[in-house]
Image (spheres, rainbow, N blue to C red):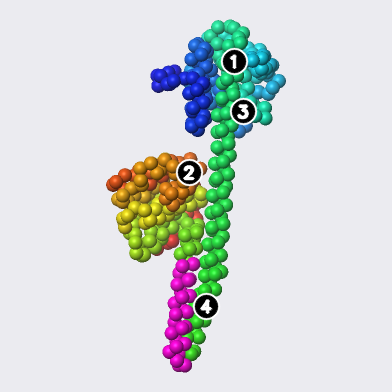
Amino acid sequence: MPQALSQRPTSETHVLKMLSQGAPMVEVLNELCNFIDAKSPGVIPTVLLPDGDGHLRLAAGPKAPQIWNEAFHGMRVSSYASFHSISGHQGKPIPVADMTSDPSFAACWDLALSQGVQAAWSAPILSRDSKILGTLLLFYPTPQPLGERDLELMEQVIHMAAIAIESHRNEEELREFSRLLYQSQDEERRRIARELHDSTGQELAVLEMNLSRVKTAISSRGREFDEILSKSIALARSISDELRTLSYLLHPPMLDECGLNAAIRSYVSGINQRNGLHVELEIPEDLRRLSEEAELAIFRIIQASLTNVHLHSGVSEANVKIEQNLDAVIVAVSDEGHGIPEGVLDHAPRTRTVGIGITGMRERVKQLGGRLEIATGRGGTTVKAAIPNRHFRTLTPVDEPQVACQA
């Protein structure tokens, strides 16, 4: 067992504290194994969880030899037929199975026996509706039946393990719901942007042309009409420009047509043409195409970060840098402003006062399996995101004409 693990406090209170603080499931399950080890030295505790095809995998067990992993993976999720109830703590029945006589565990029992294990017992980890979430396995170095102390310990552990597993599943379901929500929002933004550009924008263009024709036709009838029409034409042109900008902000059409490289260049160019913020852009000419979801996430991260620079940093310059390597695409947006107030980022998931889009950035990056880091201080702020290479697209002829889009 690693030295760092053996030095940590291992108690039921400590595990409950980890659960209350939302510690990752694997850390909680490993700590539960350490809890058993502290109570019953010599025992090798493990926790197995089902994967998508119904097979089991080793999820926790700091003392389990690595050689056992393959044997565990060959096992399938046990049913209640494998277990029989034994009275445990306060007379409550605990379903357990003797691995030495249960064919469900044959794949790992022979291997465990060769490693000096003389007895092994299993208990299902059950959900609140009595569905099997996983399995707790205890391997003993001596042949022995389960005593009352063992049953009480197993009961404590499987209850806490069930809380950790169900919390993890709930978090995964929430994350998937969040992903679908973002996807729905993005699709709706795309639809509205297209509608503004193709319908409302075109109608405004026709209105502007008609007004120009009317102005030409009646210009000889007096300056009063000429002035009114000039203002009307200018107003129509202004509304058209604002709609075009709004359409782009909702969903940049170049992202679909030409890819991330062209969309970011166009977006930064638009910012630099307006007063208030100047952005230096470093981006590879040969930036690889990513999945649609990943490209949109990177664009939104840059968009939200630059908006925060403009609104909160107190400076008028920012830098956007994109790098790519074999493992990931790395995006960094930095400024030399006064930074984010101390302690504010710690409350980002629970408040909207941190800045525009920080919680959204974190969620998008998390859903893509990447990482987001925000470094801030008196010297400025840097938002850095890494999107893993599994989101790289396989190059196709469609991906090649990006240079034309950038022109």
Q: Is residue 371 visible?
A: yes
Q: Nearer the viewer, residue 257 or 10?
A: 10
* Residue 235 highlighted magenta (yes or no): yes
Distance in Å between CA atoms under marks 1 and 4: 80 Å
Q: Give amino acid for label 1.
A: Glu
Badge 1: residue crowd in 10 Å (few <14, some 14–19, many ≥20): some
Q: Indicate which disc residue 376 carries.
A: none
Q: Tell whether position 177 is magenta.
A: no
Sequence-earlier tag: 2 or 1: 1
Q: CA distance from mark 4 to mark 2?
A: 46 Å
Residue position for label 2:
350
Which amino acid type is shown beneath numbered disc 2?
Arg
In the picture of the structure, the residue carrying the numbered disc 4 is 207
- The span from disc 2 to disc 1 (Cα, nearest Å) is 39 Å
Label 3 residue SS: strand
- Mark 4 or mark 2: name the one nearer the start of the chain: 4
Identify the residue at horizontal 43%, vertical 84% (top origin). Answer: 227
Q: Quadrant of the C terminus?
A: bottom left
N-term-proximal mark, 4 vs 3: 3
Q: Nearer the viewer, mark 2 or mark 3?
A: 2
Marks 1 and 3 sit apart, C-alpha to C-alpha, by: 20 Å
What residue sits right under mark 1 in the picture? 152
The reply to whether discs 1 and 4 touch (Cβ–Cβ < 8 Å) is: no
- Magenta segment, principal secondary structure? helix
Residue contact at pointers 4 and 2, CB within 8 angstroms = no
Q: Which residue is mark 3?
A: 133
> Which amino acid type is shown beneath numbered disc 4?
Leu
Residue extent of the magenta highlight: 219-243
Q: Residue furthest top?
A: 143
Mark 4 or mark 2, which is nearer to you?
2
Circle 3 packing at 10 Å, graded few (<14), some (14-19), many (20+), is: many
